[in-house]
Image: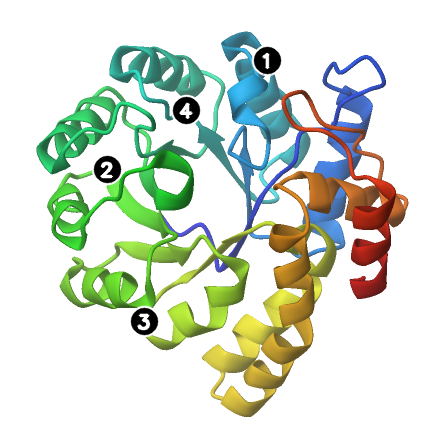
Amino acid sequence: MDFGRLVTAMVTPFDTKGQIDWEATGRLIDYLIDEQQNDGIVLAGTTGESPTLSDEEKLELFRFGVQRAAGRCKIIAGTGSNNTADSIHLTQAAEETGVDALLLVAPYYNRPNQDGLYQHFKAVAESTKLPVVLYNVPARTGISLTPETTLRLAELDNVVGTKECASLEVVTQIVHGAPEGFHVYSGDDGAALPVLAVGGHGVISVASHIVGKEMKHMLNAYLSGDVKAAAKQHQQLHPIFKALFSTVPNPVGIKFALESRGVTVGGVRLPLVWVNEEEANALKQVF
């Protein structure tokens, strides 16, 4: 399955009591599709504050997202965890909500070896008919899928891609050895263009909440052969990419950016906290 080139890992809007704001969620989905030109949306991923969402909230979010998107973009459900049995349970429940695919993060905290990682992803993938996108983010999980393990998993029928946050060298190895139709997405906004240059398919992005149109222009420029225009767009976007991840923890920065632009998404759940005055001023300068 092709999820397009630009996919947003969507924030989860909260109201003043810290509960999911469904009206704001609907408006945000429309905004990401209609104004920011996204091909797909990930719900309940890291940027969606998945660690503090209950399974019930995630499933309601998946159902709501499918209904609101109404076929205008692909809806990808974040159902990964460090508990294989729980991930299988959530995956199977998510399948019934009508989502298009699943995003499965590498198990965090447990620190399994490569065979453990393979068996975990294999068990979850085999529990569903939905397409599966792997998610390798060593900075958050404390472990990393090797290219060899990723390619081994790519042999499974419904493992169709990976969101890769390791080095460009790792991306290159995966692209080189991947079967036809297996797509590698950058999980790092700043690496979106370099990943495309070594054969990657696109980006699963955070910054695309506010600069989706510009990112789409960058990707399309490169794909059409205008490398100079793509590079120029990347250079212009780079300060935003950097600020969103170096100033405050994700998704605090992107939620602040959206609120600053009049797109209501609310605050964050503990243990995350809102920006202080110094952080707000630094972010405002860049935006």
Residue for point 62% across, 39% down = 10
Q: Does label 2 or label 3 sit earlier along the sequence?
A: 2
Examine the rendering and report whether any part of residue 226 can be seen.
no
Q: Amino acid at mark 2?
A: Asn
The residue indicated by pointer 3 is: 199
User: 264 or 276: nearer the eye?
Assistant: 276
Q: Mark number for residue 57?
A: 1
- What distance separates the C-alpha of mark 3 from that of mark 4? 27 Å
Query: In the drawing, does residue 142 fall left or right of residue 119?
Result: right
Q: Mark 2 = which residue?
A: 158
Residue at coordinates 53% horizontally, 15% vertically from top-left?
59
Q: Looking at the image, which residue is at 44% across and 19% down?
A: 94
Q: Residues within 10 Å of mark 3 (few under 14, many from 20)?
A: some
Disc sitting over residue 79 in the figure: 4
User: Mark 1 near mark 4, Cβ–Cβ under 8 Å?
Assistant: no
Q: Mark 1 vs mark 3: which is more N-terminal?
A: 1
Q: Of helix, strand and loop, which one carries label 3?
A: loop
Q: From mark 2 to mark 3, how far is it between C-alphas?
A: 21 Å
